[in-house]
Amino acid sequence: MPSLTEYFGYTVTNLGPLTTTYTPPAACTTQTTDGVYFANASHIDIALGQPSCGIPSAGKCVPSGSALDKLREPFDETPQQGFFYYHSPGVVCPSGWTTAGTLAHANKTGTGDEAGVMTKDSFEGLSTKNAEMQLDPKDVWLEILEKDETLAGWTGGPRGGCFSSIGPFESYSYSRRCIQYYPKSAVKYVTDVEGTYMSKAIVSIASVTETFTAETETLTDFVEPTELADWAVVKWLPAIPLVYKEDDVADAKEDGEEDGEGNAASALSAARGVAPVVAVVVGLLAGAGLLMPW
C-alpha cells in the first residue's frame, strides 16, 4: 500500500482491503432524492449547488461507507485542503462496476501513461483562470502511489465520483440551494508544491479554527431563469479507488478460478493490454453515466 499519508495538505487514507465482491443495495442507483446536486446539463461533473447543506452519507452504497462518512465529517465543518482515499489491497470491483480507465507512471520522468477516462482534461468545463489555480488530481495520485502499485477507482473522469443526470432542473420543484463560504483566512495562494515551483499560483486551503458559513439561498435571487433552463439535477455517488500490486491481481485471479466465480481481477489486469508498473483503474458504476469532481 502507499506509504504517503499526506501530500500538499491533502489527507491520504487507506480504507482497508477490498478482495471480495461487494454488492450495494439497489436503492443506491434507483432513488433520486439523496445525494443529488445541480449542474449545467453540458458539464454535470461541475456542481453548481445542492438542495440542502451537508455532505450526503455514503452509507451502504460503497464498501466501508461508514468509514468514508467518518473521514469526510471534519471537511464539512471547518475549511481543510481535502482528502484522497483508497482501498488496498483492492482487486475486486463491487457488483455492477467495471473498469473505465487507467493512469500509470510511464517512465522515469514521472509523467503519466493515460488511457480511458483518464485521458480527459481534469478541468474541462472550468474557466481557464479557475483551472490554472488548482492542482491536478492525477498529479496527486502519481505522487501517492508507490512504484510497484496500481490504483483502481472511480468513474467517467479524472476528478473522481460517480454521477448521472436524472432530469432537467425544470422538471423538479427545487427553489433553494446551499452555499458554503470559506473564511478569507483559509484561502491561500502558493507557488511551492512539496518543493516544486509552480509558474502560476495554486489555491491552497489552510486549516483554520473558523467554521464554514453555510446557508440556503433562493435560486432566482442569484441565478437568471434563463440559466436555470440549462441546469440538470444530478445523482452522485463516491468513487471507489483500489490500490493493488500485480501479485495481488494474480492471487485474486487464482482464488476466483478456484471458487468458480468471476471477479474484477481479470478486468484490472486486462485494462491496459500491457500491465503498467503503476496505474489508476477507474471503476464505473454500470448505468451511472459520467463522473463528478470531489
Image (cartoon, helix red, strand yellow):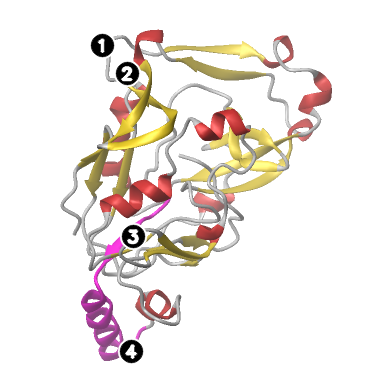
Per the model, the C-alpha gap separating discs 1 and 4 is 54 Å
Q: Which residues are magenta?
A: 239-261
* Element carrying mark 4: loop
Q: Report the side of 102 relative to 121 (left or right).
A: left
User: Is residue 53 a member of the stretch shown in magenta?
Assistant: no
Looking at the picture, which amino acid does disc 2 mark? Thr
Looking at the picture, which amino acid does disc 3 mark? Thr
Q: Main secondary structure of the magenta part?
A: helix
Tell me where residue 22 appears, x and y as whole percent.
Answer: 35, 63
Q: Does label 3 or label 4 sit earlier along the sequence?
A: 3
Per the model, the C-alpha gap separating discs 3 and 1 is 39 Å
Tell me where residue 36 appears, x and y as whole percent.
Answer: 57, 36
The one of 107 and 114 positioned closer to us in this rendering: 107
Q: Which residue is mark 4?
A: 260
Quadrant of res 223:
top right
Disc number for residue 235: none
